[in-house]
Image (cartoon, coloured by chain):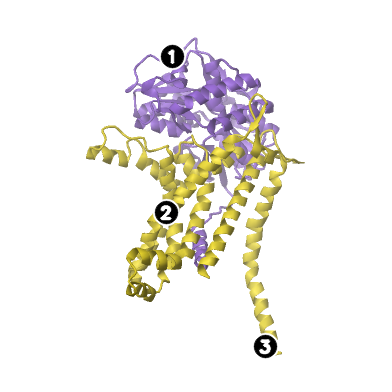
Chain colours: A purple, B yellow
Amino acid sequence: MKSIYGILALTTCLTVAGAAYAEGQLNIYNWAGYTPPDLVKKFEAETGIDVTIDTYDTNEVLLSKLQAGGGSYDIIVTAHSFIPVHAAEGLIQPIGLKDMENIENLDPQYLTADWNPEGDYGVPWQWGTTAFAVDRTVYNEPVDSYETLFTPPGALQGKIGMFKGASDLISLAQLYLGVPFCSEDPSEMQRVLEVLLAQKPHVKVYGGGGAMREQLVSGELIAASNYSGQIVRGREQKPELEYIYPKEGVASWIDVVAIPKGAQNYENAQEFINYILQPEHAAMLSNHAGYSNGVPASREFMREDLLAAPELIVPDGIRVVPLATCTAAASDLEAQLMTQLLE
Amino acid sequence: MTTTTRAQRIRRRTILGLTPAVTMMGAFMVIPLILVVVMSFMTRGQYGGIVWEFSTDAYQRLIYVTRLDGSLAYNLSFLAILSRSLVLAGLTTLICLLIAFPTAFYVARQSQRTKSILLLLIMFPFWSNLLVRTTSWIIILRDFGFVNQFLMWVGITSEPITLLFTNGAILVGLVYVYIPFMILPIYTSVERLDNGLLEASFDLFATRFQTVRHVIGPLTMPGIIAGSILVFVPSLGAFITPDLLGGGKKLMLGSLIHLQFTTARNWPYGASLSVLLLAAVLIAMFILARRAIRARG
């Protein structure tokens, strides 16, 4: 048995942990593939602040990581519907927007938004919609409803991708059934569960947005739920990807930049937020990730094809339903639903 | 007189020498484990986290679940997840053993130089991150990945076969990740094998199969058992591999625990599942360790 301990010790030694100093640092926790590398480089060069980026792929993972007290992040980015939860749980702090010189660039509607109780818990990073996309090289029937996604015809069966994050996955099924977001009605949620369970045999993967975009491009998925900007990026590689605007409506969200409580580099975080409120930099966010931002003046720096992208322009007559902040009872139902769906 | 002082001095030195190891184990293993047990007896917080109030809900949850309509039902899904995990971890161990035994035997019979090169190669994958190693299997197994392209090139199939996001893909990933833990312990016990005993076995007209069964098998049993523990235990709790290669469709125990700390926001239940997993592992190790001692004695 002695040799085992030797082997174990050796493998432990191979896992080297790196530590960094807290001076001139900025630790960002953001969605995977969401932070433009050129922006980070520019910020580092202009301020001398060293930026570290860590990524996640569902809002729920971010929330639980902050709740566990882990990470020591200075900047987080999460959907607007999660901001009141983070605020109520004491996980984020005011960002001091008033003192930032670039506040005037921000679209004022975000200062009074209902997810932003004191107007100072964050500013938009990007905003967009959630629906689904279809690969038109393979499937050419007309699509105007979530029905194609939830009860797929033969050609799409086994080639469907769905979100693994609870709020994103459930909200699409709720749109399909006409059930309000964050429903507290068990019988309504039971119907949502049944739709998702019936769809499950046809689902190839429950994944994150970025991964599913790649699988749409590579042809492994033919239809997949996704965010508008991911399809903008996917379409650059595969022009036949079509972002569908279902007649039942699309979900909309704003990813918000916030500062966690106890951030060790609060001033650097403020400097970064101020930095991305500059039109040129806000445009860099959009040009990289393919979504709209909260700075109107950034349009002149944005890629032209992006300004005309059908994924970012919701057609008239399509309902746009903002994601809501769920009460504890509603989150409970969602959690139970997810466990029963995936077990 | 002098002998006792010397013995005492040695003992004192032993205790002193052990202190760092014991402190490490205490701080980084025993205390976190106690925290897990404590957490499993607390009340869940509304948005995750825990409320410091005693509750046995997390353990009742192992047996009963509340359905969406509020009714209670037996938690059959937990049994399904448990048995799926046991089957996959068991198969992983078996396949690892079948591949590792001949490999270890081959390595042990090489010259000193070749041996160290081969051992280094076996350890080599550990120099990169588990996520990277697992993700590379996605590239190999995907619809238009290496395997499918090869199969279509050879003409075995005309359309890609679905390999990724299946139980088979999880199995491949687990075997790949944990096989060094099987090879190395078997290697050490094979290396110590006395050639004289093998010669004696053949001199006494044992067939090759009989030699393996009655001589090599029992002598390398401690290595086999140690390797099986080192593969079975982490496979049972694995969650990255099932998540990435299984497409998140079929939960394993590790992913069920992960789910409780993220989407499901039920930390105490996650903790009680961890305690259960730990207990199961300890019992299995206890049984195997007793067998190992018997095999050696």
Q: Which amino acid does label 2 sit on?
A: Cys
Q: Distance between the residues labelled 1 and 3?
A: 91 Å
Label 3 close to label 2 by CB (< 8 Å): no
Q: Which mark is residue B96?
A: 2
Residue in view at x 36 percent, y 15 percent? A141
Which chain is disc 2 placed on? B
Packing grade of label 2 (10 A; few <14, some 14-19, many >=20) is many
Residue type at the position of mark 3:
Thr
Q: Can residue B140 be seen in this view?
A: yes
- Front of the two marks 1 and 2: 2
Occupied quadrant, residue A60: top right
Query: Considering depth in this image, is A263 or B32 the residue closer to the camera?
Result: B32
Mark 1 or 3, closer to the camera: 3
Counting from the top left corner in percent of width and height, residue B174 is at 45, 48
Q: From the viewer's perspective, is residue A78 above or below residue A309?
A: below
Q: Distance between the residues labelled 3 and 2?
A: 50 Å
Q: What element carries label 1?
A: loop
Mark 1 burial class by Cα count in 10 Å: few <14, some 14-19, many 20+? few
Q: Which of marks 3 and 2 is nearer the N terminus?
A: 3
Question: Residue B111 at what x, y percent from top left?
Answer: 33, 71
- Tell me the quadrant of the picture where the C terminus of chain A can be found: top right
Amino acid beneath label 1: Asp
* Residue ranking furthest to the front: B205
- Looking at the image, residue B206 lies above or below residue A330: below
Residue lying at 44% horizontally and 43% vertically, measured from the top left: B170
Q: In this view, does A198 lie to the left or right of B142?
A: right
Query: Which of the labelled discs sits on residue A144, or is there none?
Result: 1
State which mark lies toward you, 3 or 2.
Answer: 2
Give the residue at mark 3. B3
Viewer-side residue, A116 vs B165: B165
Residue at x 51%, y 14% (from the top left corner): A248
Q: Which chain carries label 1?
A: A
